[in-house]
Image (cartoon, rainbow, N blue to C red):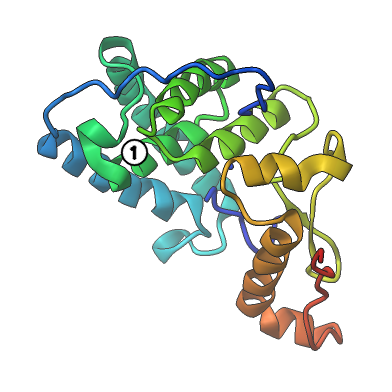
């Protein structure tokens, strides 16, 4: 069964109880406008193929998935060269948008979780010196865990039930997930899932109307 809506990829910093070290200052490097621009253009293509089939491929998921895989693999070849020569691309080199663009393409390299985990370690170091988005640690941590058959820590990789409500299949230590998310500056899991549910319902409103569902089912927010 093909999905109604493909979820775009559209984030684990452990709480170190005794860590009182002073983070190493950000490396001073020149902003690379050319690289940032290239990342932006690559991400436009990434996001196109992360979505639903379009144009002459509308409705043809088989072909679309082949094209998406080809795009992701092509992008990863370029990203691997960057990582090998420079490391993780942080704010100082490509700006906040560039860092986000770099991260999302790493996030979509699901065919190579070993490499994803390698980049995750580099990302964590950049977050320590405020040179990357902390939420990206949560997202990439969960992505690596899902891709290697382990439960999530932050609840970022969601699915939808028959009512169109977002949910998390496998989550470690669910009772403390919001504490972990807060450490990365993320909203509560309930808020995150409700936002996903509302978006999914709006995009598929006609389908839900046909099966008698007139409003989204939301979670009660924690007090």
Instruction: Report the residue at 83% width, 38% height from top.
Output: 171
Q: Which residue is mark 1?
A: 99
Comparing 15 with 219, the one in front is: 15
Q: Is residue 12 visible?
A: yes
Give the quadrant of the N terminus. bottom right
Residue 96 shown left or right of residue 46 in the figure: left
Residue 60 shown left or right of residue 206 in the figure: left
> Does residue 135 sit above or below 118 in this rendering?
below
> Does residue 127 sit above or below 139 in this rendering?
above
> Does residue 192 sit above or below 203 in this rendering?
above
Q: Secondary structure at mark 1?
A: helix
Instruction: Report the residue at 14% width, 34% height from top.
Output: 31
Comparing 79 with 192, the one in front is: 192
Which residue, as the protein is rendered here, is positioned at the far top? 84
Q: Where is residue 10 shown, x and y percent of the image?
A: 52, 51
Instruction: Report the residue at 68% width, 82% height from top.
Output: 205
Instruction: Report the residue at 47% width, 42% height from top.
Output: 68
Q: Where is residue 89 shown, x and y percent of the image?
A: 31, 28
Comparing 73 with 200, the one in front is: 200
Comparing 113 with 99, the one in front is: 99
Q: Is residue 4 visible?
A: no
Q: Where is residue 118 shown, x and y percent of the image?
A: 51, 15
Task: Say which quarter of the image contains residue 167.
Answer: bottom right
Give the quadrant of the C terminus. bottom right
Q: Where is residue 91 shown, x and y percent of the image?
A: 29, 37
Task: Say which quarter of the image contains residue 56.
Answer: bottom left
Mark 1, residues whose alpha carbon is within 10 Å: few (<14), some, or many (≥20)? many
Residue 190 shown left or right of residue 81 in the figure: right
């Amino acid at each position: 069964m093909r999905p109604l809506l493909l979820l775009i990829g559209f984030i684990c910093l452990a709480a170190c109880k005794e860590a009182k070290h002073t983070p190493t200052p950000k490396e001073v490097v020149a902003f690379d406008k050319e690289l940032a621009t290239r990342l932006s253009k690559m991400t436009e293509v990434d996001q196109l193929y992360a979505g639903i089939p379009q144009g002459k491929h509308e409705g043809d998921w088989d072909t679309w998935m082949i094209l998406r895989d080809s795009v992701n693999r092509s992008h990863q070849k370029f990203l691997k060269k960057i990582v090998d020569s420079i490391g993780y691309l942080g704010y100082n080199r490509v700006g906040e948008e560039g860092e986000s663009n770099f991260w999302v393409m790493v996030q979509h390299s699901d065919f190579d979780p070993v490499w994803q985990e390698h980049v995750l370690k580099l990302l964590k170091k950049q977050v320590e010196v405020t040179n990357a988005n902390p939420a990206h640690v949560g997202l990439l941590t969960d992505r690596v865990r899902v891709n290697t058959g382990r439960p999530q820590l932050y609840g970022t990789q969601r699915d939808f039930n028959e009512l169109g409500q977002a949910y998390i299949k496998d989550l470690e230590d669910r009772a403390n997930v919001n504490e972990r998310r807060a450490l990365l500056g993320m909203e509560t899991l309930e808020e995150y899932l409700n936002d996903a549910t509302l978006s999914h319902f709006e995009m598929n409103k006609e389908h839900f109307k046909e099966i008698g569902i007139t409003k989204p089912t939301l979670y009660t927010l924690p007090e």
